[in-house]
């Protein structure tokens, strides 16, 4: 063989070998690490905040089941009076982190309301909210739609039958008053979505109108979650959108009727996140990973199923959450939705095994597409006052959502045998596939935020 032929053969073999090494490195890059360095915690005594809702469960369970302690963390979990004070306490350092509305880190980072760079590496749950109306409003809805006059009316219930109530109020010079928990809450966007799908205008935010009442046919005001039932009972509001257990509380008190859940408005929608300041995350990277490890384990524990498919640990979780220092609601009220059932009326108990999801469907991963949806709603209803290009939505959500922190925590748990490889979406780009799982059937694609905003009849157009 000539020298030239030998050299060509050598180059070919070298090329193949280098290709194999590159491929192997790619595989290794996509594989969880088998061995990772021990986390040297920057801070091991922490204080986290929450609002008294069942979806604070991952924080509570991580503490009560010892998952934080397993990571070398001593954690206090403390109830906060409202969402604004909770956020303020994270920003001022009174809290290290908190159970937050999904919209809060995004809104704070872009400067709507309080201005601060907040980040999240963990989504706490899917679903979990409902819309409840007072008995008087329900009676009027039944009168407008006789199909609702049943112990078990057909679901989902749209806001079409609410139109008569809304118009009667307008004719008398008033507006129907309803409650939601915070301007950038899922609850605000869900009740707006539900009303607007039926052609009822829920109002716009403007630079002069921070309450969002402009052009409103129904006025939506802020009420802290635990106060929703009593506020409706007093007649201040005639309905509300809130998380559990405060819809089931209205049923148990006999003062109202839940008409829909957010599972029907947007199936498997993201609800709460665990949020910290970017400054805290930058100063405590190892502690942050340790916290996320504990929360992932808590979510998995909450969704663990028995051989018969029932939720194995939910009753125990409800016993814990019913304590006065946590949610403080009756065990039986908490158990309704948390164990896979939901009462729309005392005569209408329905199986809803995914009313609360804490781990399934890759729900704890911080999906970029989830964050983009909240930004589209801020723009739709005027909280973002100016048109933005599609690239802005992607760039903004990547300032807030931290999948690398989540994956680092998950790789450690996999190496420790505490989760399965299939529990984590290792190779995603952060965007879920497009979905039409909304009450109006409109498709949402996180990669196309402008098209999504423009697909709705009521709201801003770009």
Image: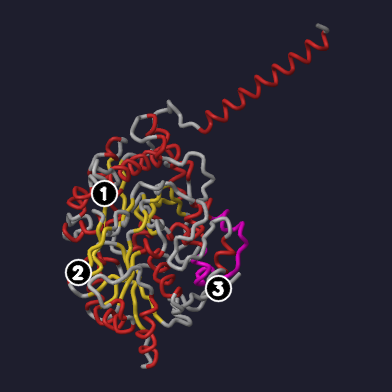
Pointer 1: what residue?
60
- Label 3: few (<14), some (14–19) or many (≥20) C-alpha neighbours in 10 Å: many
Q: Of helix, strand and loop, which one carries label 1? A: helix
Indicate the quadrant where residue 102 lies.
bottom left
Marks 3 and 2, how far apart at CA:
40 Å
Q: Residue 218: x, y in percent?
A: 40, 80
- Front in this rendered view, residue 275 or 4: 4
Circle 3 sits on which residue? Answer: 460
Q: CA distance from mark 1 to mark 3?
A: 39 Å
Q: Which mark identifies residue 380?
A: none
> How far from the left and from the top, in percent, is residue 387?
60, 68
Nearer the N terminus, badge 1 or badge 2?
1
- Front residue of this view, candidates 172 and 257: 257
Image point 19% across, 50% down: which residue?
Answer: 315
- Mark 3 or 2, closer to the camera: 2
Q: Residue at x 25, y 55 (%)?
A: 338
- Figure check: 203 above or below 296: below
Determine the secondary structure under disc 3.
loop
Q: Sequence-wise, which precedes: disc 1 or disc 3?
A: 1
- The residue that mark 2 highlights is 347
Residue range (magenta): 376-396
Q: Residue at x 61, y 23 (%)?
A: 21
């Amino acid at each position: 063989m000539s020298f030239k032929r030998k050299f060509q053969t050598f180059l070919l073999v070298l090329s193949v070998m280098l290709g194999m090494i590159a491929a192997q490195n790619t595989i290794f890059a996509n594989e969880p690490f088998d061995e990772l360095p021990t986390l040297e915690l920057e801070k091991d005594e922490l204080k986290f905040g929450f609002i008294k809702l069942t979806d604070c469960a991952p924080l509570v369970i991580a503490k009560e089941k010892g998952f934080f302690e397993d990571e070398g963390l001593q954690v206090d979990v403390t109830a906060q009076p409202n969402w604004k004070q909770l956020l303020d306490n994270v920003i001022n350092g009174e809290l290290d982190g908190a159970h937050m509305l999904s919209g809060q880190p995004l809104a704070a980072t872009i400067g709507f309301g309080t201005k601060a760079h907040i980040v999240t590496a963990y989504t706490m749950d899917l679903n979990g909210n409902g819309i409840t109306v007072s008995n008087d409003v329900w009676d009027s809805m039944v009168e407008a739609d006789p199909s609702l006059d049943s112990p078990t009316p057909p679901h989902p219930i749209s806001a079409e039958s609410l139109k008569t109530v809304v118009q009667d109020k307008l004719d008398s010079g008033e507006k129907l008053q309803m409650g939601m928990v915070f301007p950038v809450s899922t609850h605000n966007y869900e009740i707006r979505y539900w009303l607007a799908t039926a052609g009822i205008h829920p109002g716009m935010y403007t630079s002069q109108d921070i309450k969002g009442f402009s052009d409103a046919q129904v006025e939506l005001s802020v009420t802290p979650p635990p106060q929703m039932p009593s506020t409706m009972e007093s007649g201040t509001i005639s309905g509300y959108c809130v998380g559990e257990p405060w819809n089931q509380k209205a049923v148990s008190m006999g003062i109202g009727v839940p008409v829909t859940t957010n599972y029907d408005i947007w199936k498997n929608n993201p609800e709460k996140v665990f949020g910290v300041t970017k400054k805290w995350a930058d100063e405590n990277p190892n502690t942050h990973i340790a916290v996320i490890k504990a929360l992932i384990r808590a979510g998995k524990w909450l969704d663990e199923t028995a051989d018969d498919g029932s939720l194995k640990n939910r009753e125990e979780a409800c016993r814990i959450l019913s304590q006065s220092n946590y949610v403080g609601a009756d065990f039986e009220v908490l158990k309704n939705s948390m164990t896979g059932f939901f009462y729309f009326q005392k005569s209408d108990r329905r199986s809803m095994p995914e009313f609360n999801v804490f781990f399934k469907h890759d729900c704890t991963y911080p999906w970029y597409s989830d964050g983009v949806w909240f930004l589209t709603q801020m723009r739709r209803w005027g909280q973002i006052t100016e048109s933005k290009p599609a690239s802005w939505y992607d760039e903004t959500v990547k300032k807030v959502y931290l999948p690398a922190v989540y994956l680092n925590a998950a790789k450690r748990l996999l190496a420790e045998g505490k989760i399965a490889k299939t529990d984590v979406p290792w190779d995603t780009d952060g965007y879920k596939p497009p979905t039409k799982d909304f009450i109006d059937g409109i498709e949402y694609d996180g990669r196309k935020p402008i098209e999504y905003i423009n697909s709705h009849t009521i709201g801003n157009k770009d």
